[in-house]
């Protein structure tokens, strides 16, 4: 019975010694991904619209 009490006392002493450990939290670095193909898509749509308007104007004459 004394061995069980001694083991319990030692385990409590060991766990309480680790309980107060202050460790600085580790933050994950923030990853920002920017799309590089966005500029070509912004030019294509107005050019297609201009081509359609030019084709309609040319067919009316």
Image (tube, grey):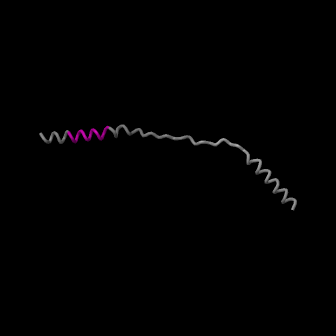
Give the image location of residue 16, x and y in percent.
77, 50
Q: Is residue 51 rendered magenta in the image?
A: yes
- On the rendered image, what quadrant is the N terminus found in? bottom right
Residue in the picture at 26% in, 41% down: 48
- 51 left or right of 27? left
User: What is the magenta segment's predominant secondary structure?
Assistant: helix
Q: Which range of residues does the magenta coloring cover?
A: 43-53
Residue in the picture at 73% in, 46% down: 20
Toward the right, the furthest residue is: 2
Give the image location of residue 14, x and y in percent.
78, 50
- On the rendered image, what quadrant is the C terminus found in? top left
Toward the bottom, the furthest residue is: 1
Give the image location of residue 46, x and y in percent.
28, 39
Residue 49 quadrant: top left
Q: Is residue 42 rendered magenta in the image?
A: no
The mark total stands at: 0
- 32 left or right of 5? left
Toward the front, the furthest residue is: 20
Residue in the picture at 74% in, 47% down: 18
- 55 left or right of 47? left
């Amino acid at each position: 019975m004394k061995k069980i009490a001694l083991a319990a006392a030692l385990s409590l002493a060991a766990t309480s010694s680790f309980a107060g450990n202050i460790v600085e939290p580790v933050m994950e670095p923030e990853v920002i991904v920017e799309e590089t193909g966005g500029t070509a898509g912004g030019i294509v749509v107005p050019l297609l619209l201009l081509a359609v308007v030019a084709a309609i104007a040319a067919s009316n004459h």
